[in-house]
Image (spheres, coloured by chain):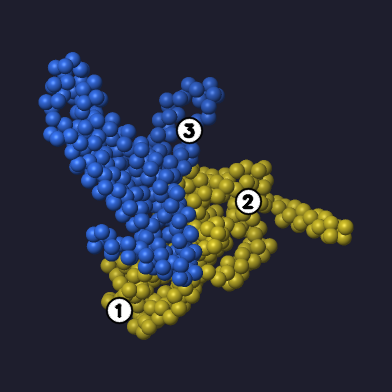
Chain colours: A blue, B yellow
């Protein structure tokens, strides 16, 4: 076991020991743990959608049509150029109201016919807005990773596939993407870890994740030092265990499956 | 059997007193009201450390107001940073977080009449001897004050330092907690805080802090509504009724005196 891991595990055990030694800490653990489900579900749902969005954008970026490449690049550069916190505020207070009026315009015949009520921005709660913002933000980052993966596959293979009678789309789906995905798997996993940490930003909207639960608990007990120790402990548990999994994954992928 | 008579008499009495209390207030006919707060402002709104449930002065007050107005309350959570914008957008019907009624904010949202007068105390380290009131604090250019941007304590600090919002003696922090932590470590020398919050910090950290000087500022807290909301008037009327019949006094006693964090 590497020394850094020994040190981190030691730190974790110390934190746990102090948790069970004093009554205060175990109450803090309970309070902060109640945000764990929200942190995990916000991260998992956003990441799943961001994967789809990212893959779609990456395919547009390598598409043979110029308009597709221009649109995808415009989006990616725009979103990657903004801090995640700004994206979050923007989606929550500009994007969602605009989305609501956009939907109203789209469905106006149905609404006027009385088949459905008009959309209101209050129909989208803060958790939904947070997921939307993380999805849109991370979609741009993941798109660049997917693109790098696609470009890492030798162009000769595409040409060979086309010589064998596959069209562009078939070559992409059957030849390029399987290899590209394998190549970028560790990078994607690292982005997931980054997202676990960035999910703390949703607390600015009052979404009840680990960070917000820590803020709320410390506000009523005035135990800031103790509470944020516990918050840090939870994030480290998540991120360190995930990062160990990624290292495992990298090792596995590096092992050549066939001599090349 | 006797027990049931007692119960019936109590129910009758309760109904009578209830109808007496609601007399003269508008009837909202069971209308649903979305109320929002953050649960990070003891003792107005905070999470009970044991159950995690939202409790506090504002919870009790608004629950009582809704009862008298015959409205159904649904509680929602937001953060202070986004509350005013969310209420302005109509995401919630009424917001509360010890929000001071100011002219700037009146341009964004509508306020109810004031339900509380808040005064700020200077929270300092227990061994502080260099100043004892706003005047001696302002006179020494080495002394720094910590504040949360956009909050009452920030404007109070601006006030005592001559009115310049960009004064470099004011250090900004994201939360009360962070500014008090900065006070503890010596990054700042004073934090303005209302009576109950400073009592909370002093009690939770024996020997670390004290308050000095007389309270300053005369801040009125109001509930916030979307501009033009038809709830402003009913809420203001209910506030007046609750002030008059002693309900608010009882809540003050319960949350500012009896409750121990």
Pointer 1 local density, CA inside 10 Å: few below 14, some 14–19, many at least 20: few
The chain holding disc 1 is B
Q: Residue furthest front?
A: A259
Residue drawn where x is 46% and y is 67% of the image = A20
User: Comparing marks 1 and 2, which lies closer to the viewer?
Assistant: 2
Q: What kind of element bears circle 2?
A: helix
Q: Which mark is residue A92?
A: none
Q: Residues within 10 Å of mark 3 (few under 14, many from 20)?
A: some
Percent across and percent down for residue A124 are 46, 39
Question: In terms of secondary structure, where does tag 1 sit?
Answer: loop
- Residue A195 visible in the shown view: yes
What residue did someone put label 1 on?
B140
Q: Badge 3 sits on which subunit?
A: A
Residue behind mark 3: A119
> Distance between the Cα atoms at labels 3 and 1?
56 Å
Q: CA–CA distance between discs 1 and 2? A: 49 Å
């Amino acid at each position: 076991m590497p020394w850094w891991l020994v040190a981190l595990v030691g730190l974790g055990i110390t934190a746990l020991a102090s948790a069970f030694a004093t009554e205060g800490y175990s109450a803090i653990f309970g309070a902060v743990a109640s945000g764990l489900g929200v942190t995990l579900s916000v991260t998992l749902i956003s990441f799943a959608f961001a994967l789809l969005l990212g893959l779609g954008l990456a395919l547009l970026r390598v598409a043979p049509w110029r308009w597709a490449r221009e649109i995808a690049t415009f989006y990616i550069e725009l979103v990657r150029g903004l801090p995640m916190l700004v994206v979050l505020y923007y989606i929550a207070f500009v994007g969602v109201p605009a989305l609501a009026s956009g939907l109203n315009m789209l469905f106006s015949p149905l609404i006027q016919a009385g088949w459905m009520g008009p959309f209101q921005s209050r129909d989208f709660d803060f958790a939904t807005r947070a997921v939307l913002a993380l999805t849109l933000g991370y979609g741009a980052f993941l798109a660049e990773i997917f693109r790098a993966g696609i470009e890492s596959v030798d162009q000769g293979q595409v040409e060979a596939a086309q010589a064998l009678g596959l069209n562009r789309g078939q070559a992409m789906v059957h030849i390029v993407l399987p290899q590209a995905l394998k190549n970028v798997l560790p990078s994607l996993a690292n982005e997931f870890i980054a997202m676990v940490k960035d999910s703390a930003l949703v607390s600015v909207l009052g979404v009840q994740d680990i960070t917000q639960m820590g803020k709320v608990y410390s506000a009523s007990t005035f135990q800031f030092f103790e509470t944020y120790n516990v918050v840090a402990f939870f994030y480290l548990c998540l991120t360190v265990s995930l990062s160990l999994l990624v290292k495992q994954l990298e090792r596995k992928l590096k092992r050549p499956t066939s001599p090349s | 059997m006797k027990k049931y008579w007692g119960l019936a008499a109590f129910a009758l009495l309760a109904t009578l007193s209830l109808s007496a209390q609601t007399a003269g207030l508008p009837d909202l006919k069971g209308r649903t009201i979305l109320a929002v707060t953050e649960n990070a402002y003891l003792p107005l709104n905070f999470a009970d450390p044991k159950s995690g449930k939202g409790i506090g002065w504002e919870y009790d007050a608004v629950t009582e107001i809704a009862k008298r107005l015959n409205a159904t309350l649904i509680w929602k959570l937001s953060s202070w940073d986004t509350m005013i914008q969310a209420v302005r957008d109509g995401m919630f019907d009424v917001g509360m977080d010890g929000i001071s009624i100011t002219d700037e904010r009146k341009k964004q949202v509508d306020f109810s009449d004031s339900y509380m007068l808040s005064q700020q105390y200077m929270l300092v380290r227990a061994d502080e001897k260099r100043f004892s009131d706003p005047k001696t604090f302002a006179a020494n250019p080495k002394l720094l004050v910590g504040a949360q941007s956009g909050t009452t304590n920030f404007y109070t600090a601006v006030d005592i330092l001559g009115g310049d919002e960009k004064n470099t003696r004011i250090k900004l922090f994201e939360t009360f907690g962070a500014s008090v932590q900065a006070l503890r470590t010596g990054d700042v020398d004073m934090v303005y805080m209302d009576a109950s919050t400073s009592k909370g910090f002093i009690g939770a950290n024996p020997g670390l802090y004290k308050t000095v000087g007389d309270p300053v500022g005369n801040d009125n807290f109001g509930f916030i509504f979307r501009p033009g909301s038809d709830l402003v008037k009913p809420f203001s009327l209910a506030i007046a009724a609750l002030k008059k019949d002693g309900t608010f006094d009882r809540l003050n006693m319960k949350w500012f005196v009896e409750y121990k964090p």
